[in-house]
Image: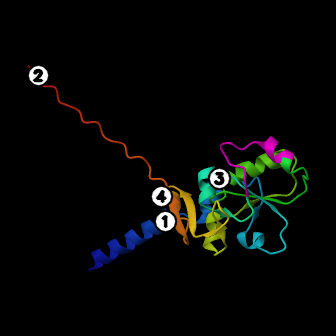
Amino acid sequence: MKTVLFLFISLFAAQSIAQDTLDELLKKHNKNSVPYITVQELAMPITDAVILDAREPKEFEVSHIKNAILVGYDFFDIKTVTEKHTNKDQKIVVYCSLGIRSETIAKKLKDEGYTNVLNLYGGIFEWKNNDFIVVDSEEKETNKVHTFNEAWSKWLKKGDKIYEEEPKTEKKKTRKKSKK
C-alpha cells in the first residue's frame, strides 16, 4: 500500500512540475523588451488602443479580438504599419496566441519610434480564458480559437480548440537483403 501511495504521489508531483505556468512560459520565451497589458485592462470600455494581431491569416480567420488589425508575423511589414498609423504616441496593443510572437512585433514597433506599445499578456488564449468575446472572419461571435497545434492547446482553457494535425511521418520499410 505504501508503495502504491508513493508511486501515485510521485506521478502527481512529476506531472505538476512538468506543466509550466504561463508566467514561466513567457519568461522562458520573452525578453521583456515590451511592457505587458492584461486582458482586463484592454477590455476596459474607455480604451482607445489600436489592436494588432501578430498571428497568421489562418489563425486570424478562425477568430480574433474584435476590431483587431491583422499584421501577421511571418509577413509583418513595418512600412505598412507606419503608413497606416502615423501617430507614434497612439496606444498600440499587439497580441498573438500567448504573447511570444507579439513581443517580437511590438519590439519592431518600438524600434521604429512608437512610444506606447504594449504586449497582451497571454494573448488571445488568455483573452478567451477570461470569457471575453472573439469574432470570426465575418465579425460574428465565435467560441473557436486557433491554437496552432495540439501542444499549445493546453493553454486554452475555454473555447473550441482549432489546429492542424501535424503530418505523421511514415517509417520506411526496409527490406533485408538476403545473402546468396
Q: Residue at x 63, y 60 (%)?
A: 98
**Residue that carries the numbered disc 3 in the rendered image:** 55
User: Left of 38 or right of it: where is 148?
Assistant: left
Which amino acid lies under the numbered mark 4 shown in the image of this protein?
A: Glu
Q: Nearer the viewer, residue 19 or 101?
A: 101
Mark 1 to mark 3: distance in Å?
Answer: 29 Å
Label 2 crowd (10 A; few <14 / some 14-19 / many >=20): few
Please report contact status of discs 1 and 4: CB closer than 8 Å, yes or no: no
Q: Nearer the viewer, residue 24 or 49?
A: 49
Query: Foreground mark, 3 or 2?
Result: 3
Q: Earlier in the sequence, mark 2 or mark 4?
A: 4
Q: Is residue 107 magenta?
A: no
User: Which quadrant: the C terminus?
Assistant: top left
Q: Quadrant of residue 172?
A: top left
Query: Foreground mark, 4 or 3?
Result: 3
Q: Quadrant of residue 49?
A: bottom right
Q: Residue at x 66, y 57 (%)?
A: 96
Q: Position of residue 17 (x, y in %)?
A: 49, 65
Mark 2 to mark 4: distance in Å?
Answer: 46 Å
Q: Earlier in the sequence, mark 1 or mark 2?
A: 1
Q: Which mark is residue 179?
A: 2
In this rendering, does residue 35 appear at all? yes
Q: Which mark is residue 17?
A: 1
**Residue that carries the numbered disc 4 in the rendered image:** 150
Q: Position of residue 147 (x, y in %)?
A: 55, 59
Q: Which residues are magenta?
A: 69-83
Which amino acid lies under the numbered mark 2 shown in the image of this protein?
A: Lys
Mark 1 to mark 2: distance in Å?
Answer: 52 Å
Q: Residue at x 78, y 46 (%)?
A: 108
